[in-house]
Image (spheres, grey):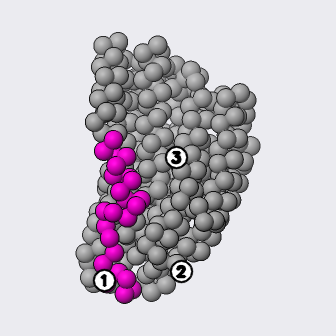
Amino acid sequence: MTATVVAWILLLAVAAYACGGGVDYGAGFWDLLAGGAERGKRPRWLVDHAMAPVWEVNNVWLIFTLVVMWTGFPLFFQTVFTALWLPLALAAVGMVLRGAGFALRKPTRRLAARRIYGAVFAVSSLLTPFFLGTVIGGVASGRVSPGTTASADAWANTTSIMAGLITVAATAFLGAVFLTVDARRFEAHDLVGYFRLRAWIAAAVLLALGVIGLVVTDPHASYVHHGLTHGAGLALVIAAVVALALSAWLVAGPAAGWARYSSVAVVALLVAAWGFAQRPYLVPTSLTVQQGAGADAPLQWMLVVAAVALVFIGPALVVLYRLDTHGVLEPLTDEDVAE
């Protein structure tokens, strides 16, 4: 029972990082596609202002995920980090380079240096979620199991590639929706339609990749495919599609701010659908939650730590996100308005 509760906490932490970090990765994705220095000046200006107050705090969810995974399910942690160390290492490098590129681009005045830092930030924003997605695909396909050694087949397969592409599309969708709302908040009216169009395109691509993924991964990830097309997993997938359509509708209307919540619901529901489809396994069909769980004492302490984190960190993050979405943390300067 304790292991099951900790497993759901782990899934919630993954969902929180997918939503919070996904917005930031999506902003970097659109930064990459914004065009040259002059054409992309306005979109990149908005990305800088929207991301600056919160881009580091989203890593809290990633750290919490690793702590729960390592402490609660050490055999699962060992299995994943042994068999899939290469995509995980590439994702880690991407996170470091992405943060460095974003932090160094803003104060840099020389155009050539800004281009280099901007390219590092943007390319890393594309590759990092892709490699994280391939890890999810590798686990969902059951190609890794306790004792599996590292190989390209564990993560460079059809299921992993599709999972990587879907992850990138989901982050692009989240980023475009939030930037559309941010454009309204910063009164950058020329960018509202710009990012709204990209939100619609990303939503269509995400839907198409989801359908293609369900079809092509059937023979490669049969257990998870069955879970996603039956029962609770199917209900959550349908709910995610409804939330996707609702987001596309909301982002075009006067209540666009609500699109942030519905877009987050899309990603959270997809992660939940994956969890339901995969239960009771941590790795289908070789490692159940009970088999992968650690000793009882660490699991019980993990529940205590989760409760403490919920009480002390949760409200602080809620306040931070609320202040940011209401434009309190970084008001526009005169130079910004002049641009």
Q: What amino acid type should be assigned to the residue bearing mark 1?
A: Asp
Image: 36 above or below 311:
below
**Mark 2 or 3 closer to N-term?**
3
- Say which of marks 1 and 2 sits in front: 1
**Viewer-nearest residue: 270 or 100:** 270
Q: What amino acid type should be assigned to the residue bearing mark 2?
A: Asp
Residue count near mark 2 (Cα–Cα under 10 Å), binned few <14, some 14–19, many ≥20: few
Residue count near mark 1 (Cα–Cα under 10 Å), binned few <14, some 14–19, many ≥20: few
**Mark 1 or 3 closer to N-term?**
3
**Viewer-nearest residue: 196 or 25:** 196
> Spatial distance from mark 1 to mark 2, Cα to Cα?
18 Å
Circle 2 sits on which residue? Answer: 190
Q: Is mark 1 on a helix, strand or loop?
A: helix
Q: Is residue 195 left or right of residue 335?
A: right
> Spatial distance from mark 2 to mark 3, Cα to Cα?
33 Å
Q: Does the magenta stretch include residue 337?
A: yes
Q: What amino acid type should be assigned to the residue bearing mark 3?
A: Gly
Q: Is residue 181 visible?
A: yes
Q: Which residue is drawn at 35% across and 18% down?
A: 299
**Tag 2 and tag 3, C-beta contact below 8 Å:** no
Q: Which mark is residue 334?
A: 1
Q: Which residue is drawn at 39% across and 86% down?
A: 339
Q: Is residue 183 magenta?
A: no
- Which span of residues is magenta-colored? 315-339
Q: Can residue 55 be seen in this view?
A: no
Q: Is mark 2 on a helix, strand or loop?
A: helix
Image: 297 above or below 243:
above
Q: Which residue is drawn at 74% across and 43% down?
A: 215
Where residue 308 sits in the image (x, y, percent)? 29, 29
Circle 3 sits on which residue? Answer: 133
